[in-house]
Each structure stands twice: as C-alpha cells, then as structure tokens.
Image: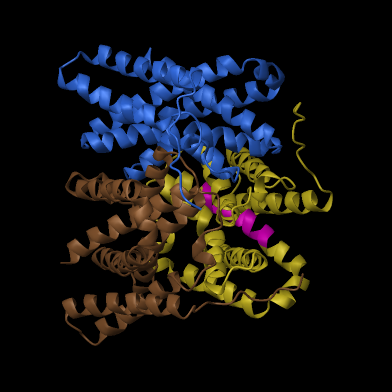
Chain colours: A yellow, B brown, C blue
C-alpha cells in the first residue's frame, strides 16, 4: 500500500514537472529533464547528503524511472485535459508531499540519525524536487513564495516524533502523519494560509 | 588515444565556458570558475550520484585540472582570435560531447549498473557541465532550448548497447558510438534539427 | 578557540543569508532555508565532492544547526538594528571567510589530498555558501562580480602551503593564514580592489 502510494507520488510529481516545463516552452527533452528532476530531485539530494548511492541508480529501483517516464508521457499526450485536471493533479502532488516526507523520515531513522536531522531529510525529500525544477527554470523557488509548503513537512516531522514517543503502532504512525500533512496542505491552499514576508525598510 | 581525446574534450569545454563567462562580463576569477564548472560539472554530478569521490579530487587525475586551467588561459589570452575560431571550438565541443558520453557509459558499466542507468550517466556526464554553466549565469539552461543536444547522447547510448548486443569489438564499439554522436550533432546544427516545444494554450 | 571562531562564522553566515532573504521578500521559511544554505552550503559541497556523509548530518555536529538557527532568529528579530550593524556583520562574514578556508584546507589535508585540491576545497568551503544563496535567489552569484573574494581564499591557500613548507608551527600557521585572508579582504573592500572583466567586442 505504502509502495503503491509512493509510486503515485512519483507519477504526480513527474506530471507537475512536465506541465511546468511545457508552460516554459521548453522542447520535449527539456520537459523530460524537468519531469525527472521534479520527481527525483528530493530523494537525490537526500541520498547525496547521506553519502549514499542515489536510489534511482539501483537496479531494483528501475520501476521509479519507468513510472516517471509514464507520468511524463501522460502529461505530454494529455496536457490539454490535464489543465482541466489541475485539481486532481494538485491532489496527487499533495499525496506525494505527505508520502515523500515519510520516506525521508524513515530513511533517516534507518541510518540512525538524530530526529532534527530526520525532519530535515524528510522535508528535503518532499520539497527539493520542486526547488530543482524552479532552479532549472531560472526562477526563485516557488517554495519560498507560496502558501506554506515546506513548513508543513517540518510540522509533519514533529507530529511523527511526538506520536512515536507515545509508542504509537508503526502503521498508525505512518497513516496519521501522512494524513496530517495532506490535510494541513489542503486547508492551507483552501484558506490561503501564508507566512508573511517581513516588512523591510527600503 | 581515448585519453588523449578526452583531454581535448576537457580543454574544449574549459574554453567554451571561459568564452561564455567573458561574454557575461564576469571578472577573471568568475570566468575561471565557469571554465572549471563547464569542464568538470558533468563528471562531478555523475560521481556524486554514484556516491563516489569526485574524479578530479584524485591525485592521479590532477592532469585534468591542469588541462582545464590551460584551456582557461588560452581562452583569456586569445579570446579575440577564438571568436573567429568559433567553428573549431564548436568542433572541440562536439568531440567532447561524444567522448564524455562514452566515459559516462563506461563508468556505469564498470560499476555494474543497468543499461537505462548507464545511458543516463553518459548523458549527464556529457551535458551537465553546460547546465552548471548556465545555472551559475542565472539562465535557463541552453540545453533545453537549442538544437537537439542531450537527446543525441541518449541516442548514442542506445546505439552503444545495440552494438554491444551484437558483440561488436570494444574498440570499434567506442569508435562507432562516438562518431555517431559527433556526426548527428554536426548534422543537427547544420540543418537546425530541433524538437519543437508543444503549443500550450495561454 | 578555533572552534569558537568557527561557530561565530556559522552564525555570521546565517545572519547574512537571512538579511538577503528578507530583502528578497521571501517568507520566513524561505529566509530560514537561505540562512541554512548560506551557512552550510560550502561545507556541504566540500563533503559531497569528497564522497563523505555531510558534516551537519552527524549527531556530534548538531551544534552547528542550533547556532545557524540562532543566527536566523537574531536576524529576524533584530533586522532593523542589524541594518545599522552592517559593519559588524561584514566583519563576522570576513572572519567566517578566513576560518572556513582553513577548515576546508585542513579537511583536505587530513584526507590526504594534493595541495592543489586542498586549496580548491578551502575555497569551496568558504565561498559556496554565498553561491548557493544567490542561485536560490535566481541571481548571478555575487562572488563573480564584486571585489575580489574567492581569489583571496586561493591566495590564502597558497600562503598556507608556503608557510607549511618552511615548517611553521601549526598554531602560528593557522593564525597567520586566517589573519592574512581577513586582512586582505578588509583592504580589498576598503580600497575596492577588483579584477576587471575583460573587454569583449560586441
């Protein structure tokens, strides 16, 4: 179940990257690179920081590449329809956000890192794909300017370790944390929760 | 022979990076950084993704640094002449493209990766230097906008594994693949082969 | 003493990153990311290039994260005052520059790298934080355009190995090198030492 949802996250991020690339009038190869970068950017930075071989290089993980390519192809062939499907795409992206955070948290735990570092790894896994996408398009990362996004991953990480402390069962722990992230993200967009920039003189 | 050509590739990429930096009116140190980033960016990302120590840190590979510095110095002292030499530079850059792709493919094979991953590593080795150059100059990577470029590396990788399957001899395999990449690149620029961006409403 | 000054460097870079982010009108989370990226970017790239686990992931180095967070909070709460304190901030930043260069040089030596590579690692440690900050803000890195900066780190590295050759005592060696870097940087800003871009026709 967990893996199935993770794969949906990969496809959703690949589709959202493809749409961004097409809007930027990149050629089809450029769109492809943006799709992969959006999908794999977060996990790639996480693995690099940990000094590990990157996950999508491993033969047993080839499925991720195929799913991302599939997401790209879907976006290219059905991009007119997908524009109408913005809502479903947004939902996929939100599910991906929740699941990627958990994947990062878990990987951090498995490697024995401190909770602070695990929360950072979870947030990076979930958010850095979008940052890579924006850097490649030479834009200030959207992450820094829109409704709260990465902050939700940090909050989700804190919830995760809070619930872990009271010995919640693993399945419940994962379910609750990801639902928390997904719900807060939906509410944040619905009610335009934002962190205001500070006013700076001049 | 292979090494000799690889070294020409390093120098050519360093020169092309230097010319870009000088056009951007960077100071001489900035130009130096762009030169190194263009020359080493692809191999650096490849090694980082593989979780390996980066190739140019190794003492036995110091020659690459010296060659890149030489390329930089040539570009700085002879930049007026080099502008007339655009054609020869373009040739060097194209040779570099073919050779770097092979270097990446081979390194992937040596480490036992799957062909799909090897093709990705070859393409990254050949193309990411230029992407780094453009990111440092805060531009949308040229890669995504000009005549087909990275796509040729992918095609070269497919040719490589096709020929390998029919048990072509190693030397012939390398020669054929790199000539294929170089020839397609020359034709692509000559006849302006492009992948059209998709038309997006609005 | 060395560690104490290094920690001042972390805080100073975090503050300078925060001020940049606030000027860019990023939200408070975006400012936080820029603060961390400025503080940790250089050491992170150094460790990644070396194929090592990144320093701030290690539990014994959590102190760096806390200090950077502190620097961020100081910048956010006292940003109006800090604007007046530009001079002291600049001083901190300059101290950080000198110390980070030494940290990189030393780490390179410990891992047995060649002096050329050690100088590169020292320069990257000191300068890449600022480059990351500027890339995330979609600007051409300041590094390439202002008074000499990275060049001073390279010069500092050369001084370091020169003094090492004449068997200077370690403490004196560190002190002299960092004071050299700090003094040259102060003079460079005071007298606007710049490396002129080359004039390019057209």
Viewer-closest of C158 and B165: C158
Q: Can you give x and y, in whole percent of width and height, for residue A13 in the image?
A: 61, 63
Residue at left offset 37%, top offset 71%: B119
Judged left or right of residue C185, residue A183 is right
- Which of the two residues, B56 or C140, is positioned nearer the viewer here? C140
Q: Is residue A193 magenta?
A: no
The spot of residue A168 in percent (x, y) is 61, 45
Name, please, the residue furthest toward the right: A191
Residue C93: in sight, yes or no? Answer: yes
Horizontal placement of B50 versus A200: left or right?
A: left
Above or below residue B39? Residue B28 is above
Q: What is the magenta range?
A: A93-105
Residue A118, given in percent of the width and then of the height, sits at 52, 41
Is A103 included in the stretch rendered in magenta?
A: yes
Q: Quadrant location of the C terminus of chain A?
A: top right
What is the count of numbered marks?
0
| Residue at position x 65%, y 18% in the image | C82
The quadrant of the rendering that contains the N terminus of chain A is bottom right
């Amino acid at each position: 179940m967990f893996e199935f949802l993770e794969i949906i996250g990969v496809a959703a991020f690949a589709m959202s990257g493809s749409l961004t690339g097409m809007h930027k009038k990149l050629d089809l190869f450029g769109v492809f690179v943006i799709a992969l970068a959006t999908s794999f950017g977060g996990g790639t930075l996480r693995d690099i920081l940990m000094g590990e071989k990157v996950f999508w290089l491993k033969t047993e993980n080839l499925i991720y590449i195929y799913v991302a390519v599939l997401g790209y192809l879907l976006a290219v062939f059905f991009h007119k329809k997908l524009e109408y499907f913005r809502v479903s795409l947004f939902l996929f992206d939100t599910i991906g956000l929740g699941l990627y955070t958990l994947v990062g948290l878990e990987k951090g735990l498995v490697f024995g890192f401190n909770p602070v570092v695990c929360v950072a790894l979870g947030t990076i896994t979930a958010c850095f794909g979008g940052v890579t996408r924006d850097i490649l398009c030479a834009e200030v990362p959207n992450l820094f300017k829109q409704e709260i996004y990465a902050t939700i991953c940090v909050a989700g990480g804190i919830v995760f370790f809070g619930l872990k402390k009271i010995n919640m069962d693993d399945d419940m722990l994962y379910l609750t944390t990801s639902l928390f992230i997904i719900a807060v993200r939906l509410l944040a967009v619905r009610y335009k929760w934002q962190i205001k920039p500070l006013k700076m003189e001049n």
